């Protein structure tokens, strides 16, 4: 399996669709004629629960996304530092080799 940060990002964005699904179910209970006979107090309680769940998942998704962005920033900084370290090590090695030739 060859997953990348891009693949993870796409899966996270799909996870964000759960709030759309909750919205869809909520709308179904509000608009579908089969539920018109539901007692108003029960309907309100049910809708409040769905809205609370939707808000909970929006918060969780936003927190997850913030963490993902922080990890991506750290990854890119580490990648740049590693590249710089490799370049410095390469220059040092080049200087060492050049020194060997200069000595002769």
Image (cartoon, rainbow, N blue to C red):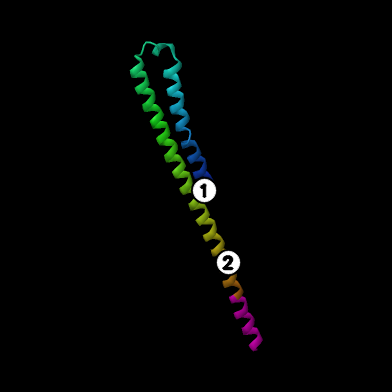
Magenta segment range?
92-104
Q: CA distance from mark 1 to mark 2?
A: 22 Å
**What is the x, y in percent for residue 66?**
48, 47
**What is the x, y in percent for residue 41?**
34, 18
Q: Residue 97 falls in which quadrant of the image?
A: bottom right
The residue under label 2 is: 84
The residue under label 1 is: 5
Q: Is residue 30 left or right of residue 41?
A: right
**What is the x, y in percent for residue 26?**
43, 23
Q: Residue 101 falls in which quadrant of the image?
A: bottom right
Q: Residue at x 43, y 28 (%)?
A: 22
In the rendered view, would you say 59 is above or below 26?
below
Between 102 and 28, which is closer to the camera in this rendering? 28
Is residue 18 part of the magenta span, yes or no? Answer: no
**What is the x, y in percent for residue 80?**
56, 61
Between 104 and 76, which is closer to the camera in this rendering? 76
Q: Residue at x 48, y 52 (%)?
A: 71
In the rendered view, would you say 63 is above or below 52?
below
* Most frequent secondary structure within the magenta stretch: helix
Q: Residue furthest bottom?
A: 104
Q: Residue at x 39, y 27 (%)?
A: 50
């Amino acid at each position: 399996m060859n997953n990348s940060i891009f693949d993870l990002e796409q899966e996270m964005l799909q996870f964000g669709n759960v709030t759309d699904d909750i919205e869809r179910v909520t709308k179904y209970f509000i608009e579908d004629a089969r539920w018109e006979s539901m007692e108003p107090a029960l309907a309100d309680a049910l809708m409040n629960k769905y809205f609370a769940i939707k808000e909970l998942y929006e918060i969780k998704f936003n927190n997850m996304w913030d963490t993902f962005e922080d990890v991506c920033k750290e990854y890119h900084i580490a990648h740049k530092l590693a590249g710089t370290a490799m370049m410095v090590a390469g220059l040092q090695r080049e200087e060492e080799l050049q020194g060997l030739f200069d000595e002769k």
